[in-house]
Image (tube, rainbow, N blue to C red):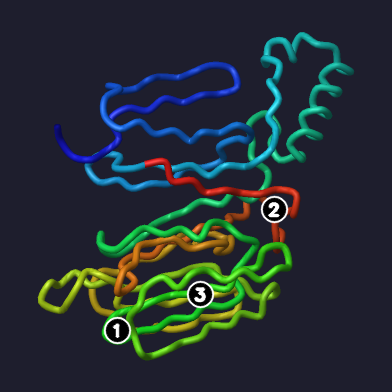
Amino acid sequence: MGPTVVKSITFHTTKKIHGPFGDEHGTFFSSCLTEGRIVGFHGRAGWYIDSIGVHVLEGKVLPQRSDAALADASPSAQSDALAIARREIGDQVTYGVVKEPVPVGPGPWGGEGGKPWDDGVYTGVKQVYITRSDFIGSIQIEYDRSGQSVWSAKHGNGGQIIHRIKLDYPHEVLTCVYGYYNTCVEQGPRVLRSITFVSSRGKYGPFGDEIGSYFSSATTEGKVVGFHGRSSQFLDAIGVHMQHWLGVNKTSAPNSSKYYISRYLF
């Protein structure tokens, strides 16, 4: 019946349903939200949209009055409605404009092998352990979650050489990750060969040989708040969850009362 790609998609809002766009045949998927709002998308794409996922901002979402009804209301009613909306969503969204940093997940870059993994989104990154040989064997990350250290699982099982990247967190944050992955069958599997971490204070790496296809995360102003990728014997692919600073609002950590969740749907 063709490639394994998204064949139909439907969007649900607080006001109506948009879609379905495409034929509703195949395996069903859903974000299954009970409370919260979608604040970003991630996935995979080639000729088609191969897969799609969402970033969710948790919290209760109240139905809002229409723009026309709000425009016809008195100034005091408009002010009350805006105040209620701000109390409910923490002054994050006003008339659909996102004011807080929104995490997004570019990548992963590398091969198609291995099993997918996703550490999720945290306040920041404190340190990273890398093992390597001819290829990047594994990665393990210590995250910060509002002052509490959380270690990820070890992604990958290869490599004898160990590298440790310790950041002066929260005064130093990761801002970019780049490297190379193998594309030559004669030189081994399609996995990462080199990785470099860029922080707000400098550069760590490169770890491994810079040979193959180059990749890089976004260089926009912000910080890395999580990793995802694919791994088996080696680190097949890697991607990052970024928290981009929008406008002039720059903070070192998101408010502890707000939680961002990255969901893979398909």
Left or right of residue 156, residue 84 in this image: right
Question: Which residue is pictured at 53% across the width and 83% down the height?
Answer: 165
The mark closer to the camera, 3 or 2, is 3
Residue displayed at 44% across by 33% down: 30
Q: Which mark is residue 43?
A: none
Horizontal arrangement in the rendering, residue 125 relative to residue 17 (left or right): right
- 103 vs 176, nearest the viewer: 103
Asked which secondary structure carries label 2, the reply is loop
The first of marks 1 and 3 along the sequence is 3
| Rendering quarter of residue 191 | bottom left
Residue with the mark numbered 2? 248
Q: Quadrant of residue 33?
A: top right
Tell me the crowding category of disc 1: few under 14, some 14 to 19, or many 20 or more residues within 10 angstroms, Cα based: some
Q: Are marks 1 and 3 in contact (CB under 8 Å)?
A: no
Specify which label sits upstream in the sequence, 2 or 1.
1
153 displayed left or right of 75: left
Which mark is drawn over residue 209?
1
Residue type of the residue flagged with mark 3: Val
Q: Residue furthest left?
A: 186
Q: Is residue 198 above or below residue 106?
A: below
Where residue 87 sits in the image (x, y, percent)? Answer: 81, 34
Image-based side of 146 in relation to 2, left or right? right
- Is 146 rendered above or below residue 182? above
